[in-house]
Amino acid sequence: AAAEKGGFDTFMAKEIHEQPQAVADTLRGRIDESGQIVLDEVRMSDQDFRDIDKVFIVACGTSYHAGLVTKYAIEHWTRIPCEVELASEFRYRDPVLDRSTLVVAISQSGETMDTLMAVRHAKDQKARVLSISNTVGSTIPRESDAVLYTRAGIEVAVASTKAFLTQLAACYLVGLHLAQVRGIKYADEVSAVLDELVAAPGKIAKVIEGLDPVRQMARECAGQDRVLFIGRHVGYPVALEGALKLKELAYLHAEGFAAGELKHGPISLIEAGTPVVAIVPSPRGRSLLHDKIISNIQEVKARGAKVIAVCEEGDKIAAVHADFVIETPASPTLLAPLLTAVPLQEFAAELATALGRDIDQPRNLAKSVTVE
Ligand code: G6P
């Protein structure tokens, strides 16, 4: 069993370390020398992609969080309206779908019943379904019109890590491809983002090399009865994913919030010493977003929170305001989740280990849920 884990104590640790390679595998062969995204295997023509006037993303759990990130990217790059919905809610709501709607179903296993039912509903309504899955030949890809495989390799730990990062990479490819075939006004930005996407595996590896302080921080938080996560823009879904990891692994009350919502309720949860993990966007460019989260950090600190900031390396302002900083390499805002999600995986795993939990097989959870 030790050999199967490649020298790591758990499958989750092994899978966290496999992420740079997994993301590289997702991208491999899908970007040509001229910087065009080639998704031939998907079985959707450029014209098919041009005919779309609305995107719906459906997924569950961690895959849903990948979908939330994707909404920001697709709307910004393509100007096509995009909605994200929990697959278990989708068909009961009578969503507005037609032939020109693209439904993107994200499912690592390709077998999640909630997501499969959402796909069937979408097909009944004549929408076109593109699935993003890690499992070749599984049910959801078989029932979809088109599929993009993530190629993460088998993920054994129940809590998803490398599958999540590769879902993000695959979703970025879809968004950028949509932008390219539709001839968008952000052509320069899209090619710059593509270069950054190709550079992402190296940066993820750098984040993984720097995880020791995260582990120490996690052990220090092990006596707490709750941990809160806050973020804005794509940092918000990352906050949700950080909280989900901690719930899954440590059985701790963890919650992610859009930082702007703190003042509308959740800030009352803060007590002296409550850990708050803040996902801080790059201080460059969209500095307004950065200013806003710094003031959220000040608000929770004033109520006694212990703030752990996940920020870009060299972010001096975050360093001044937070109690503890976890630095990630610089990246365009929309791609940052590929980096900022990683320390949160390690944080959850280490905190759960300190509490004596079973990291690979948390109680009550299953890797793939095939009932509705
Ligand atoms: C289960 C797993 C989660 C996963 C979710 C969706 O609940 O425990 O880790 O995110 O299913 O799975 P899928 O295979 O559809 O991505």
Image: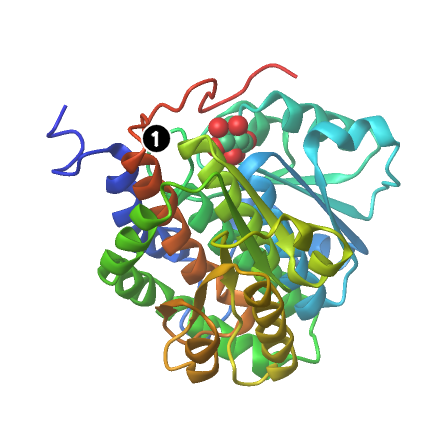
Furthest residue in direction top, as rendered? 371
Residue 213 seen: yes
- Which residue is labeled 1 in the image? 157
Which residue is pictured at 71% across the width and 28% down the height? 88
- Quick check: is the Cβ at mark 1 less than 8 Å away from ligand 1? no
Mark 1 nearby-residue class (10 Å; few <14, some 14–19, many ≥20): some
Say above or below: 364 vs 82. Answer: above
Give the amino acid type for the residue marked by disc 1 in the picture: Ala
Residue 319, percent across and down? 41, 77
Residue 145, percent across and down? 65, 36
| Horizontal relation, residue 192 to residue 151: left or right | right
Q: Quadrant of residue 260?
A: bottom right
Which residue is pictured at 37% across the width and 47% down the height? 221
Q: Quadrant of residue 142?
A: top right
Quadrant placement of the C terminus? top right
The residue lying toward the viewer, choosing from 321 and 344, is: 321
Say above or below: 141 vs 368. Answer: below
Say above or below: 158 vs 163. Answer: above
The residue lying toward the viewer, choosing from 25 and 93, is: 93
Label 1 secondary element: loop
The residue lying toward the viewer, choosing from 365 and 39, is: 365
The residue lying toward the viewer, choosing from 248 and 154, is: 248
| Horizontal relation, residue 160 to residue 92: left or right | left
Which residue is pictured at 35% across the width and 23% down the height? 361
Residue 337, percent across and down? 49, 60
Residue 289, percent across and down? 63, 75
| Horizontal relation, residue 123 to residue 144: left or right | right
Q: How many marks?
A: 1
